[in-house]
Image: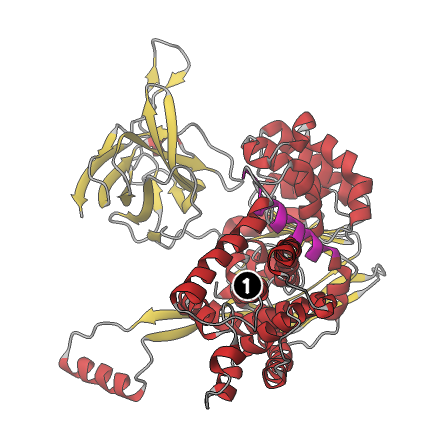
Amino acid sequence: MDNRPVMIDLQNVKKKYVIRHNFEKPTTFSGKLKLLAKRIAHPTKKHETEDFYALNGVTFQVRKGEKVGIIGKNGAGKSTLLKVLSRITEPSDGRIEMLGKLSAMLEVGTGFNGELTGRENIYLNGAILGMTKEEIDSKLDAIIEFSEVGRFIDTPVKRYSSGMFVRLAFAVASNLDPDILIVDEVLAVGDTKFQRKCIDKMMNIADSGKTILYVSHQMQTIQQLCDRVIVLKEGKVVYDGDVEKGIEIYTETVDVDATSFDLTDHKPRGSQMAVIEKVDIIDKKTCSWFYNEPIRFKIKIKAKEKCDKVKLYFIIRDLNVNNVFGKSESAEINFSQAGKTYEIECSVGTTNLLAPGKYIAGLELWRDDEGIVTIHDIVPEVFSFEILGEDTENHTVPPLAWDTKIFGHMMADETQCNIINIE
Amino acid sequence: MQKTIIEPNGHNMQYWKDIWRYRELAFNFAKRDVTVRYKQTIIGFGWAVISPIINMLLMTFIFGSVAGLSSEGDTPYYIMVYAGLIPWALLSKSLQSGAGTFISNAGIMNKVYFPRILSPLGSMLAFLIDTSISFAVLFVLMIIFHFTEGFVPSIRMLLCPLVLLWVATLGLFAGLFLSAFNVKWRDLNQMLPFIISIGQYVSPVAYSVSENFGDKWWLPLYCLNPAVGVLETFKWCVIDSMEFNSFAFFASLGWTILFIPLGIKCFRKTERTFVDIV
């Protein structure tokens, strides 16, 4: 019997969002009449609304010292759960009891102000995260040392490199001394060396007997850090227990049913001169392809400004979000008209390099001018897909193409891209 | 260890304890606002002096010279206008920052919990710091006018800090009352600057009430404007010859007593879930 005190106790927690739809445009006469009747009955109502439960009855307990990883695919309710736990927004139903001081790291550098110096920001950010001045005073040296910003500590942070900024921000947040720590994938920042340092720091915090809730897509870190895993799917807990088993179940929950992906709301990265807006899979009911079958899709890219020499990169990652191999790049695309949306048909031939299984596809838009690159847009996870075993009707496995001139190089087919429509 | 209970619409006493626990944050916000406001400017804090003086010159010209309105008795017009501008600037800034608090701080509030009310309180503190600088300028003006026109300030000036605190409170809580609407309908954000610039004319910022409208039948109606009472009271503290406008004083006080609970209630109600809308 586990007699450690219960630190977090969630009982049937729900979070409801109301989403709005525009009225569907009726095509039949009776449909039009019905809409007219609706309009007369509710003259101010412009939309139809639908309730959506981001969390739909979540119940679990976390005891002192447990390190719980929360996994689930995008939209499973992970972020909502963290927001409710960290009291950023209230649940719509249910009850949560928590013991002790809670700190949430949902983002590094919240409240950092570019005009203020590194030192001033440490105090401001520390206070926002709930530290008192004395606490910050006593940890100031440790924070500065950990951040490695050294003599730039009295420079306004707007002059920092992005790496320095992130290091300083993480240094403040990780020096919090809470009883419960909630972390949302903030470790995926900085260079590899710093990431390593962050993970070590997290391990230290974990070893000191704190209770940790950690959300991540990186199964490796979950394996390193956590001793228990909760898998969320559609706002519900579908698994709660052993780490290995949890990861296995998560991998199974990755579904490949959708074939149309609206990306208009994705987190902006890069210059945003050209933005990926929508991806539609061509001629498939699920995102599954046979080995050696080209992945074909249509992509809508909005060119906010004129940009030339742009290349589209298709990145294949495994379910641990590790790259399987380098990016497949397309030929140069020129977006010669600003403000237009380009519809491009793409075909990626690299499935002949993939073993059967599930993968995640990402897309990136870069300008590449003889090695000088500018990133326009990055969508790390566009869709999950499955490579099915060999085509049963065609038993011969096609050979891989090797570049025999430089031994050891494999030739992957270029991603074929053709502009089919501009509007 | 403290126990936190999260429930929908929970009336947790936790909130008020948290405000106490996080109290330093309000000062940190104030410090940030003041530091950032004058960063990368050549004259820095000088702007807190220059902008009210320019306003004073402008308003004296418009109301005193062009419109030909009268000052309080024989008080120099400049002093009277300046004494009106100090509380007016504080009132309008507090109102605007209170009303816009959820929107301008959405970035932080979306990512970290703290008692939200500390954010507008911090801004209010920052405005009070600005105000104390422009208040110091008033002293300089008084000394100048003492020697040139024989102006004698009132002993009631000792009450000024109290009145300014009242002004900021009224502005802030009226703003918080509006903040709830601002989250859902941003129209208010657009309207507020107009309301404030109209307010500058319909409130006694740059003219005397008793001298100009003393005999008008609509005077009581005019004094129902929440700004009139605070402005009149502040001017009364500065100008010795002025009479105390008790009707306007109680009207403003009434509004303040109304806006404090109303503001807190609306703010509390909005802060629970506003991140879902913003």
Q: Name the residue nearer the viewer: A286 or A197.
A: A197
Disc 1 secondary structure class: helix
Would residue A414 appear left or right of B102 to someone viewing this image? left
Can residue B251 be spotted in the picture? yes
Is A3 above or below relative to A214? below
Q: Chain of mark 1?
A: B
Q: Position of residue A388 (x, y in %)?
A: 38, 42
> Magenta span: helix, strand or loop, mainly?
helix
Q: Position of residue B51 (x, y in %)?
A: 52, 52
Q: Quadrant of residue B67?
A: bottom left
Q: Residue furthest top?
A: A405
Q: Position of residue A52 (x, y in %)?
A: 46, 69
Q: Quadrant of residue A59?
A: bottom right
Q: Position of residue A150 (x, y in %)?
A: 69, 27
Instruction: Say which residue appears at 29% left-offset and 37% top-offset.
Output: A293
Can residue A98 be spotted in the picture? no
Is B195 above or below relative to A347? below
User: Residue B27 lies in magenta, yes or no?
Assistant: yes
Residue that mark 1 sits on: B85
Q: Residues within 10 Å of mark 1 (few under 14, many from 20)?
A: many
Q: Name the residue nearer the viewer: A119 or A287.
A: A119
Across the whole image, how many numbered discs are drawn on residues? 1
Start-end of magenta stretch? B24-41
Q: Name the residue nearer the viewer: B222 or A258.
A: B222
Is A261 above or below relative to B187? above
Q: Looking at numbered disc 1 in the image, what kind of residue is underneath it?
A: Leu
User: Residue A20 lies in magenta, yes or no?
Assistant: no
Q: Residue furthest bottom?
A: B217
Q: Name the residue nearer the viewer: A391 or B186.
A: B186
